[in-house]
Image (cartoon, helix red, strand yellow):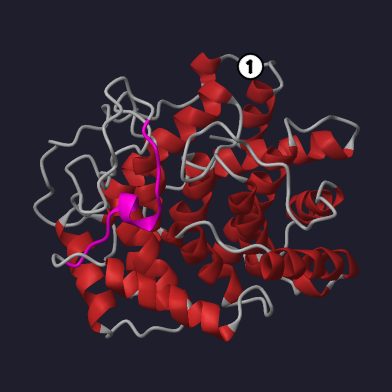
Amino acid sequence: MKPLLAALLFAGLASAADLPKVPLPKPTKPDEAMAKTWSAAKAAEYLDGVGVNWTRDRQCVTCHTNMPYLFARPLLKDSPDDGWKEVRKFLEDDVTSWSNGGKPKGDAYVVATAAALAVSDARTTGTLHPATKAALDRMWTVQRKAGNWNWLKCEWPPLEHDDYYGAVLAAVAVAEAPGKYAETDKAKEGIKSLQAYFAKTSSPDLHHSTWLLWAAAKVDGLMTAGQKKDAVADLRKAQHKDGGWCLPSLGKYNRRDEKKTPNDPAADSDGYATGLAVFALRQSGVSADDPAVSAGVTWLKANQRESGRWYTRSLNNDKAHYIANAGTALAVMALELCGEKPAAK
């Protein structure tokens, strides 16, 4: 889609009928058939379907769908990329609105937007976009004295239920931001507060520690050497015999469905936990030839579904497994970092 049309649409001056159709994938089901072989093109198609349609329908950024979409989709360079450019343009325009006196939808929204744009910049131009810098600078203005942010507490683990994840995501944003943004005066002060927060506040679960490994690989002082070593060791212990990981094993989470069925740490391996674990291990310096990493890659290549997604069961209820959207993005990121992305055709 042309940028002008996107701008007009989101300003309410164009009709949704003017937008190119982006097929929405069928609802996520645990019994969806496995793909015969893993396909970058199908992953791109799936990510476009959930990322673009979420943005058009909800007109917001969210940690489980279009934020990780911008993390991963630029890596699939051989597939048409109008979709992620549309989503990115929406966020850039949102930041411009804040800069001109508009009000963001909340502190968490600012952090998620900054992270989406920063990682996207790192994956594409390698240059800090003015909108990204504006979002990052705005992020520090809503940082609390304790060093964290007022995060969403919707009781939707693992992403929207505690303040610690917001701090971790902000750390990822500044760690990924190109152009030596971390060395700017505003960033230095914010990072100093983040370092103090992580020094005083223990990670509540392995999930958050795994995300923090990503940021700590690029910004000093977020984790001690011992904490990094422990997180890597804990990930190794949590790996299943089939080479994958499952999300319930990365923390203690209460389901919100009517039956109150427990989240089982021994549940089947899933795309989110496996993608996250492999990606974080590689970011922390573990070799792609390491047995844990190579086994995780083998699992990812064997467990993509026909739709292009990697299945992950929601920790909350079985009405909608939005976490599979993030899981698919993480799987793509992990495979790319291990040199496993074939050319999309």
* Badge 1 density bin: few <14, some 14–19, many ≥20, Cα 10 Å: some
- Left or right: residue 131 versus residue 275 is right
The span shown in magenta is 243-255
How many marks the image carries: the answer is: 1
Residue 5: image location, x then y, percent: 62, 28
At horizontal 29% and vertical 66% (from top left) the residue drawn is 238
Residue 326: image location, x then y, percent: 41, 46
- 255 over 228 or under it: above or below: above
Looking at the rendering, which quadrant does residue 298 occupy? bottom left
Circle 1: residue type: Ala
- Left or right: residue 206 versus residue 219 is left
Nearer to us in this view, 261 or 243:
261
Nearer to us in this view, 226 or 341:
226
Residue position marked by numbered label 1 in the rendering: 14
Q: In this rendering, does residue 279 appear at all? A: yes
Q: In this rendering, does residue 78 appear at all? A: no
Residue 114: image location, x then y, percent: 69, 51
Nearer to us in this view, 316 or 293:
316
- Left or right: residue 17 versus residue 9 is left
Nearer to us in this view, 139 or 340:
139
Residue 230: image location, x then y, percent: 45, 78
- 39 over 98 or under it: above or below: below
Determine the secondary structure under disc 1. Answer: loop
At horizontal 76% and vertical 71% (from top left) the residue drawn is 182
At horizontal 22% and vertical 39% (from top left) the residue drawn is 307
Magenta run includes residue 244? yes
- 78 over 8 or under it: above or below: below
- Left or right: residue 277 versus residue 188 is left
Magenta run includes residue 298? no
| Quadrant of image for the C terminus | bottom left
At horizontal 26% and vertical 66% (from top left) the residue drawn is 342
Magenta-colored segment: predominant secondary structure:
loop
